[in-house]
Image: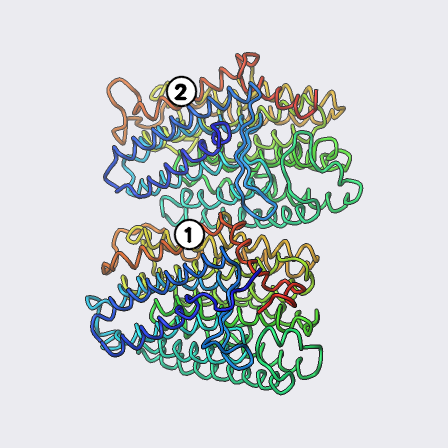
């Protein structure tokens, strides 16, 4: 096995092996656990950097292991994989730093938490690197399982109920997905992801089966991507600790679903076949409905994390929307939103976590004047919120711009109205928060309640640095969209390869 | 493949060693655990040698005492028997380790009194019976092995001495005897009709005639009873629930599979030309019903061991779906491979689950699911083992259970048999529901933890090891499936020339 063949496996193993060892570390060995966590996260980041460089230079990274007769366990880094791998490597590092500080005083087992946290990230990496649908399925189900202990981590009545609902939705979706994958492989054989799709030659014979299977696949994936009406678990799962919500909403679970939809459309069916079979139009309609419906629900929430959760429901569907409009420009918008939404949403959840940790505030109505108490955190929140609305020069603007351009060039003008409505709704539920933060007089005593503030910093540096860092990344992605290695450039590369230009 | 006429000595030894060990332990009566462990290691090593030999040299045949088939006893081992033997050895070895902790003299003696000394000889008899059954190449030897298996199982159940265990054991005894009787009658039909009882001879003689139909029906009924196929499963939950934990583990993991294994041999090789698609639907539909019924009952179980026992009823149901799926598509090994994979994956996972249930019972003095709060905090190793075993029982990747489910589902959709496919998927969802019933309690954080007795570490670690084995099976499928087909067992046309 050469280094190129081993690299995808190594990237997967850094968190998988790290996570397994963390389980065994005794509770009180805080230093050992932190060192191991950081070592694994940094190693993964380093390996990912090599991977990005290599894929840019047309290296082939492929790990193939025997799994079932005729079916390999295939890890294969293409341009689309690299996008999600880099996102999760970066966000794993910052979230780990954040979580170490956040869980300092928690009574629950931290070895268990970080163990499952690493497994959760490993599953995401596996999903990103999966080179065929069976490998994808394997990690997709692993993600469901490794996330459950994180959702119920607090062990309260409420979190147990959220865990139950989470499982019911995701296992149901998983079963549907499994059924569809087995059916598809019985019909056409091994299902390797191929740029431009691999089902073209079966379309004539099996058109009707392929249609049914497509909707089963998308419904199975749609549960995690929180497509309405399969979104019910997501707003409840926000009872998890803030770093978990951050990771769940930014890169792990919802992204796995959205990424899967992109994979199925681009690398299994291929955009051309999918539009020939008229599969994309219904998906675009569902995604648009989700975008509007999620925003409408968000407006009604007073709990900050709940509002952010409904905002995720809405925002993640941009990815599905971008993928389901025929044409390269919209595709760029959808794919790049994988990264942009992740950076912006993780910032917002970190801010919500800081607010809850230092001031014990969970409701928007109690946030009056917190900008004076937590200026840096709230500045980050402002950047994230503006990005969600889609204001230039934030990253969110770029995604919307490309989806809009793509919709126009594909002749789907109605999508513009969806984007306009969504922008207005996003503004309607984020701008009042910004107003409350910065311009209202504090109604209550905003002194530190947990002793997190150290010296001149508003909050522990390990909670502050990740928050500010991700906000700046979201800003940079917008400002420097044309720079090499920016998510936008990378998405263009992906789409060029998919559309064969 | 060339079969060696003399055969590997390991074949005789894997049966003889546990028998001798049982007698030796009965006679010595001191340091029984040490003797038992030494014997267990020896038997497992012998099984390993035999598997290695099958992989290297192909199938093995042995005529005991030099007498060939119609007169003497023939032992036969192909990839299929090798795999079963290996599964048995792995599970049994860890049951021995677990048993040495469970029946340790430091453990509460009142519960077992002097009977702990009887665990080891009976356990060795059981292991001998399993190995004999797997290696037998004629219908009558299998009867003898089945009887020994049934009697030693019943005796082991009574070791817990509690009143419900004794009544469950009596019921188990009756069912076991009726099952054997039914099987024996079938054997009599065969002998009267065909004049021989060897697998190989029967396979070339039997044709769709009334006596062979009758024999198949009687033998299958007996075997289904012993495998606890729905609706003949009523005896299993009380017996497995009330037996001592290591015994429950062995019964659920191995004993119910032994009769299934015999049925697989009969249907796909001996009675190959007799079975029809319609006949195969009967065990298939009962199996599908078992998946649903067993899972639903597991959902309302009050105690952890009861839940695990009902889960066995459901999982046995999956196994029996192989008959329609395999008969409908005789050229494909997918369904059979899937069922055999499930035998091993379920054996590891279920043994681990029963061990965990035993640990909980020992540590807290009860295993009421409602009152399991905080168990994850206090017994993280055991509960992690239960979680891993649960993943395999549900059939999620990357576990052996997933491979089995994948193969069975593929076979069902190749048909396409939509009904069986739907049951396979629904069974997974129901399994999720009953497995997570346990976790939705045990993850609850509590500050006032109840009485908690420390248990020997090996009881926790043997459960974890077995559960990890069920996970490991998910990554070795290609090689295992290849090995199972050594000597082409159950490939129906090839069977005619080279079979046992």
Residue B203 sits in which quadrant?
bottom right
Quadrant position of residue A131: top right
CB under 8 Å between callouts 1 and 2?
A: no
The x and y percentages for residue B86 are 44, 61
B133 relative to A320, above or below: below
**Numbered disc 2: what chain?**
A
- In the drawing, does residue B202 fall left or right of residue A464? right
In-front residue for pair B234/B248: B248
**Place of residue B112 in the rendered image (x, y in percent of width and height, measured from the top left):** 25, 74
Left or right: B464 in relation to A238: left
Residue on which the image places disc 1: B388
Residue situated in front as seen by the camera: B433 or B263? B263
Q: Residue at x 74, y 31 (%)?
A: A272
Of badges 1 and 2, nearer the viewer stands 1
* Marker count (numbered): 2
Measure the C-alpha gap from mark 1 to mark 2. Answer: 39 Å
Mark sitting on residue B415: none
Q: Nearer the viewer, residue B189 or A405?
A: B189
- The spot of residue A385 in percent (x, y) is 49, 23
Q: Quadrant of residue A291?
A: top right
* Residue at left offset 45%, top offset 17%: A472
Residue position for label 2: A468
Residue B158: give x, y in percent of width and height: 34, 78
User: Dot 2: few (<14), some (14–19), or many (≥20) neighbours within 10 Å?
Assistant: many
Residue B49 drawn above or below residue A349: below
């Amino acid at each position: 096995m050469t280094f190129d063949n081993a690299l995808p496996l190594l990237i997967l193993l850094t968190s998988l092996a790290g996570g397994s060892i963390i389980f065994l570390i005794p509770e009180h060995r805080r230093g050992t656990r932190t060192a191991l966590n950081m070592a694994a996260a940094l190693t993964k980041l380093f390996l990912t950097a090599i991977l990005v460089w290599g894929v840019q230079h047309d290296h082939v990274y492929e790990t193939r292991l025997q799994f079932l007769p005729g079916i390999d366990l295939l890890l294969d880094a293409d341009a689309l994989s690299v996008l999600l791998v880099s996102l999760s490597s970066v966000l794993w590092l910052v979230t780990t730093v954040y979580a170490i500080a956040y869980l300092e005083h928690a009574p629950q087992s931290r070895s268990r938490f970080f163990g499952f946290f690493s497994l959760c990230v490993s599953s995401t990496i596996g999903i990103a690197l999966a080179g065929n649908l069976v490998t994808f399925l394997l990690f997709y189900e692993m993600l469901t399982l490794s996330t459950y202990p994180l959702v119920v981590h607090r062990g309260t009545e409420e979190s147990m109920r959220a865990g139950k609902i989470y499982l019911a939705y995701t296992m149901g979706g998983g079963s549907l997905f499994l059924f569809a994958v087995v059916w598809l492989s019985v019909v056409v054989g091994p299902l390797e992801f191929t740029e431009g799709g691999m089902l073209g030659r079966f379309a004539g014979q099996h058109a009707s089966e392929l249609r049914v299977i497509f909707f089963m696949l998308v419904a199975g994936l749609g549960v995690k991507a929180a497509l309405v009406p399969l979104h019910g678990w997501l707003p409840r799962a926000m009872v998890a600790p803030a770093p978990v919500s951050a990771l769940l909403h930014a890169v792990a679970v919802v992204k796995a679903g959205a990424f899967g939809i992109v994979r199925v459309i681009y690398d299994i069916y291929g955009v051309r076949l999918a539009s020939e079979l008229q599969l994309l139009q219904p998906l675009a309609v569902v995604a648009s409905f989700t975008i509007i419906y999620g925003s409408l629900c968000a407006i009604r929430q007073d709990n900050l994390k709940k509002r952010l959760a409904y905002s995720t429901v809405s925002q993640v569907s941009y990815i599905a929307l971008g993928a389901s409009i025929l044409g390269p420009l919209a595709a760029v918008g959808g794919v790049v939103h994988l990264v942009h939404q992740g950076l912006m949403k993780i910032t917002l959840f970190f801010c919500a976590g800081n607010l809850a940790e230092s001031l014990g505030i969970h409701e928007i109505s109690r946030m009056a004047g917190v900008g004076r108490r937590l200026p840096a955190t709230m500045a980050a929140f402002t950047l994230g919120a503006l990005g969600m609305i889609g204001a230039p020069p934030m990253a969110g603007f770029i995604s919307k711009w490309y989806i809009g351009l793509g919709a126009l060039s594909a002749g789907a003008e109605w999508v513009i109205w969806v984007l306009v409505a969504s922008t207005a709704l996003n503004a309607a539920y984020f701008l009042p928060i910004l107003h409350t933060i910065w311009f209202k007089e504090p109604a209550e005593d905003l002194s530190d309640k947990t002793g997190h503030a150290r010296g001149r910093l508003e909050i522990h540096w390990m909670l502050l640095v990740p928050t500010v860092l991700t906000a700046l990344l979201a800003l940079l992605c917008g400002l420097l969209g044309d720079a090499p290695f920016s998510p936008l450039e990378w998405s263009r590369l992906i789409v060029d390869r998919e559309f064969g230009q | 493949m060339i079969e060696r006429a003399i055969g590997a000595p390991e074949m005789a030894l894997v049966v003889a060693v546990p028998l001798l060990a049982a007698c030796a332990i009965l006679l010595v009566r001191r340091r029984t655990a040490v003797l038992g462990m030494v014997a267990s290691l020896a038997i497992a090593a012998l099984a390993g040698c035999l598997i290695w030999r099958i992989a290297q040299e192909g199938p093995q045949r042995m005529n005991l005492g030099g007498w060939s088939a119609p007169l003497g006893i023939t032992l036969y081992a192909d990839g299929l028997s090798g795999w079963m033997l290996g599964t048995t050895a792995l599970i049994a070895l860890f049951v021995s380790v677990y048993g040495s902790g469970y029946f340790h003299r430091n453990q509460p003696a009142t519960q077992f009194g002097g009977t702990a000394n009887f665990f080891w000889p009976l356990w060795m008899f059981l292991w001998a019976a399993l190995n004999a059954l797997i290696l037998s190449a004629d219908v009558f030897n299998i009867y003898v092995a089945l009887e020994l298996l049934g009697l030693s199982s019943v005796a082991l159940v009574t070791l817990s001495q509690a009143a419900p265990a004794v009544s469950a054991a009596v019921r188990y005894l009756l069912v076991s005897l009726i099952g054997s009787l039914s099987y024996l009658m079938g054997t009599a039909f065969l002998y009267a009709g065909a004049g021989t009882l060897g697998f190989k001879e029967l396979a070339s003689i039997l044709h769709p005639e009334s006596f062979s139909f009758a024999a198949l029906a009687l033998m299958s009924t007996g075997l289904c009873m012993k495998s606890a196929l729905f609706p003949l499963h009523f005896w299993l939950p009380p017996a497995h629930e009330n037996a001592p934990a290591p015994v429950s583990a062995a019964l659920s993991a191995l004993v119910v599979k032994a009769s299934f294994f015999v049925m697989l041999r009969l249907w796909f090789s001996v009675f190959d030309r007799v079975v029809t698609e319609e006949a195969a639907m009967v065990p298939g539909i009962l199996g599908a019903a078992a998946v649903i019924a067993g899972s639903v009952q597991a959902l309302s179980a009050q105690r952890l061991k009861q839940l695990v026992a009902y889960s066995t009823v459901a999982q046995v149901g999956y196994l029996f779906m192989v008959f329609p799926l395999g008969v409908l598509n005789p050229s494909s090994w997918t369904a059979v491979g899937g069922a055999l994979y499930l035998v091993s994956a379920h054996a590891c996972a279920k043994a681990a689950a029963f061990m965990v249930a035993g640990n909980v019972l020992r540590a807290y003095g009860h295993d009421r699911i409602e009152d399991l709060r905080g168990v994850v905090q206090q017994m993280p190793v055991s509960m992690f083992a239960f979680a891993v075993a649960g993943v395999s029982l549900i059939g999620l990747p990357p576990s052996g259970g997933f491979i089995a489910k994948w193969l069975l589902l593929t076979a069902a959709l190749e048909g396409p048999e939509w009904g069986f496919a739907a049951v396979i998927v629904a069974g997974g969802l129901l399994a999720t529901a009953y497995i997570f019933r346990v976790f939705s309690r045990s993850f609850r954080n509590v500050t006032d933890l109840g009485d908690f007795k420390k248990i020997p570490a090996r009881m926790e670690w043997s459960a974890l090891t077995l559960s990890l084995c069920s996970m490991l099976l998910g990554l070795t499928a290609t090689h295992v499936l290849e090995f199972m087909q050594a000597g082409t067992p159950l490939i129906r046309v090839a069977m005619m020339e080279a079979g046992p």
